[in-house]
């Protein structure tokens, strides 16, 4: 199972939001590269990177920080946040980003998403962020009429290789993951599921592993020390 540390970028800094609320941010570091190197030194091989400014604006904004992390670490970077065009996906892959995460575009432009998946294959991940089972878009600020399961099944049907499921209401809360929805996705989809949101203990990781997820994304709990990355990696 993949244990993936997360860095959320806002204004070039490493931050964490509470329940996806942009007005409730905590700055954990002003040096994203140093933070990425810290996770690399502790054994991480992959990094989950979110451009929060990009997610809200609809275009990648923290380009320098993204480039610096890709160039100065050996981590396989997966990036989401405001990526809604084919040419941007291509540019990011050429830059060295290993996986590009599509979110809002998967809800609003399914045919474009299908073309992007067909062209870039394994490099594309669909990120499904939700509140109360309904998918959120535009940096978690809008709620769509699609449910997590409906969108997940639609994405699998058009060739998506994997999805990342985040319960936004639990994200940054240090409570617990949404086991029920995660289990439903694992059981009903034939593609891998990566879990995110509310993971704040080693026991949470073990329970998610037992459900059959491909990986877990850990954010705030690493920064607060609730989870030790080396201990988490030992589970995988």
Image (tube, grey):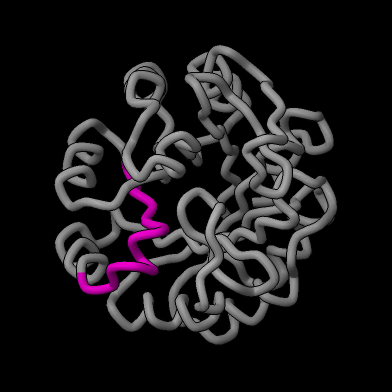
Q: Position of residue 219 (x, y in %)?
A: 66, 39
| Count of numbered circles on the image | 0
Q: In which quadrant will I find the N terminus?
A: bottom right
Residue 8 sits above or below residue 171 on the image: above
Question: Residue 228's image quarter?
Answer: top right
Residue 33 placement (x, y as % from top left): 48, 17
Residue at (36, 30) in percent of width and height: 61
Q: Is residue 137 above or below residue 223?
A: below
Residue plotted at (55% across, 65% down) = 143
Residue 86 part of the magenta-drawn span: no
Pick the front one: 49 or 53: 53
Please state if 211 lies on the left or on the right of 90 as rendered: right
* Front residue of 153 and 20: 20
Horizontal side of 11 relative to 70 (left or right) equals right
Q: Residue furthest bottom?
A: 188
Above or below — where is 203 with respect to 114? above
Residue drawn 74% across the image and 76% down it: 180
The residues colored magenta run 98-111
Front-lying residue, 93 or 207: 93
In this rendering, does residue 78 appear at all? no
Say if 22 sits above or below 15 in the image.
below
**Can I make out residue 156 in this image?**
yes
């Amino acid at each position: 199972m993949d244990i993936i540390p997360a860095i959320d970028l806002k204004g070039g800094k490493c931050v964490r939001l509470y329940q996806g609320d942009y007005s409730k941010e905590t700055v954990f570091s002003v040096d994203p590269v140093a933070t990425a190197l810290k996770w690399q030194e502790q054994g991480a091989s992959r990094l989950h990177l979110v451009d929060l400014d990009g997610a809200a604006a609809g275009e990648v904004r923290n380009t320098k920080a993204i480039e610096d992390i890709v160039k100065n670490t050996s981590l396989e970077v997966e990036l989401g946040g405001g990526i809604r065009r084919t040419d941007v996906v291509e540019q990011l892959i050429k830059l060295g980003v290993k996986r590009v995460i599509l979110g809002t575009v998967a809800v609003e432009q399914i045919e474009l998403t299908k073309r992007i998946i067909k062209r870039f294959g394994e490099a594309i991940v669909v990120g499904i962020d939700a509140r109360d089972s309904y998918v959120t878009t535009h940096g978690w600020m809008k709620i769509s009429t699609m449910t997590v399961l409906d969108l997940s099944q639609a994405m699998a049907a058009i060739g998506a290789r994997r999805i990342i499921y985040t319960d936004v209401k639990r994200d940054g809360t240090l409570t617990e993951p949404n086991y029920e929805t995660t289990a439903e996705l694992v059981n009903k989809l034939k593609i891998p599921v990566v879990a995110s949101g509310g993971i704040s203990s080693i026991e949470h990781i073990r329970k998610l592993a037992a459900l059959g997820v491909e990986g877990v994304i850990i954010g705030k709990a690493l920064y607060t020390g609730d989870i030790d990355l080396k201990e988490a990696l030992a589970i995988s």
